[in-house]
Image (cartoon, rainbow, N blue to C red):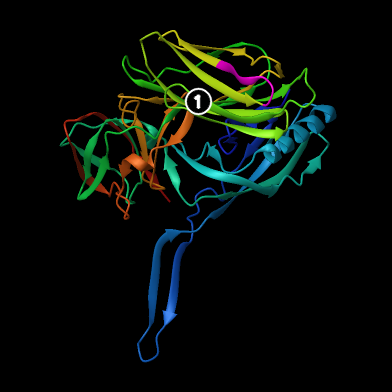
Amino acid sequence: MAIAPTGAIYKTLTFDNANSGTYGVYITGEAVYNAPEKDVEMIEIPGRNGAFALDRGRFQNIEVTYPAGIFADNEADFAQAVSDFRNLLCSKQGYCRLTDDYNSGEYRMAVYKSGLEVTPAMLQAGEFEIVFDCKPQRFLVSGESKIAVTSGDDVTNPTLFDSHPLLEVTGYGNINIGTDEIEVHNEPVGNIVLYNHKQWDSGTTRTITIDTQYANNGDRIIVEYLGTSADYQAYWTVASGTVTSASVTVSGNGTGKARKMTPDQLEISADLGDREFAYGTPATKTITVSISINTSNYGTLSGSVSVTLAYDGNSTFTLSRSVTLPNHFSSKYPVLFIGDIVLSSSQTLIGNPPVYIDLDIGEAYVIKSGEVASANNGVVIPPELPVLAPGNTNITYDNTITKLDIIPRWWKV
């Protein structure tokens, strides 16, 4: 067990939710109050007194160094604590949240850079430095709390710096942040694929389960690009028998063709076309591929392949097929292709579920089935990203937007 130091100068830091005190590591605050460097270029202009200051309106990353000590009850615990803390820091990738006891109510986004060269004393305590490369902002914890905004409200930025908030919008329409306008359109985020295409060679029946969480009664569900193909091999009783020609027809909106591979062998393929169903309405649809084959010694022979789609009105399709071979022919079982099953929904997918508009990077997205999907095709954000300036910013929106929450992301340096 680590020895907890006493005294006001001993504090801890927390990196990606792991507190240094758990490892017997405590810090002092000599370098935790430093400010980042502004990105300003001083340009000398001939014939002009002084220099022109080109202020790019940004701050550069800042290196934050924590002098630290590590304490343990004995040599074994000391070695283990050093190892555990070293591996904690080195295991983190990219920017992680960093807080310390000196700056309550604030956090940084930091990357562990270097340090942990421990100078031990009696193999129970040691000193070292921990160095982080941090984004310049000190983000305020208060800026992570949602602000519910009613149209016409003023949102007050308590800092001296513009913030780039995250908007959570339910509904659709125009949002005005000060003089800047954002448009949220009432349209879906592209097609929603409920099932990804597959093919199989054997068996006569398949059950397909689709994801219908976004479907409303009456919404169109389309089974795209159904297809089937097979090789037909003739077994002739007369050696000179050959296939002279063949034709294929498909019921509904499908197309088919026959290709002569050898004098007595055909390849039959068919595009069965799209099939449309309505969510909430059970339906069964059968597509028939009719085959007519002209032969030199048996005349005209006929066969067929039937594919049946049965929909239960909810989330299950049952797909079955049967084959009637022409006389004197044999075949491997037809390969069946089942395309994507796509929902064309009347439900508003931008704004319902909420659309998130990140004004730090100018991107819009929705969360579907726990995954992030872009909504940029349905949201228009001005090139100059709207901000919450210091002081009050008035926000208004159309009454077709039923809810607007803002995570303001306040920050200071």
Horizontal side, residue 115 vs residue 162: left or right: right
10 Å crowding of disc 1: few (<14), some (14-19), many (20+): some
Amino acid residing under circle 1: Thr
Front in this rendered view, residue 11 or 377 = 377
Front in this rendered view, residue 326 or 386 = 326
**Label 1 residue SS:** strand
Question: How far across and down, in percent of the image, does residue 350 sit?
Answer: 33, 32
Question: How far across and down, in percent of the image, does residue 158 sit?
Answer: 29, 43
Front in this rendered view, residue 322 or 388 = 322
Quadrant assignment, res 157: top left
The reply to whether residue 4 is visible in this rendering is no
Q: Residue at x 67, y 14 (%)?
A: 327
Question: How far across and down, in percent of the image, does residue 389 sit?
Answer: 28, 49
Horizontal side, residue 175 vs residue 203: left or right: left
Q: Does the magenta stretch include residue 68?
A: no
Q: Is residue 301 magenta?
A: yes
Q: In this view, does 288 lie above or below 95?
A: above
Quadrant assignment, res 97: top right
- Provide the residue designation for mark 1: 249
Question: How far across and down, in percent of the image, does residue 8 sit?
Answer: 55, 35
Residue that extends furthest to the bottom in the rendered view of this protein: 47
Total tally of numbered discs in the picture: 1
Quadrant assignment, res 262: top right
Instruction: Please state the extent of the stretch shown in magenta in the rendering.
Output: 296-305
Check the picture and name the quadrant holding the N terminus. top right
Horizontal side, residue 92 vs residue 214: left or right: right
The reply to whether residue 399 is visible in this rendering is yes
Q: Residue at x 41, y 17 (%)?
A: 213
Q: Which residue is drawn at 71% across and 28% down?
A: 242
Q: Is the magenta stretch mostly helix, strand or loop?
A: strand
Q: Which residue is drawn at 32% across and 47% down?
A: 159
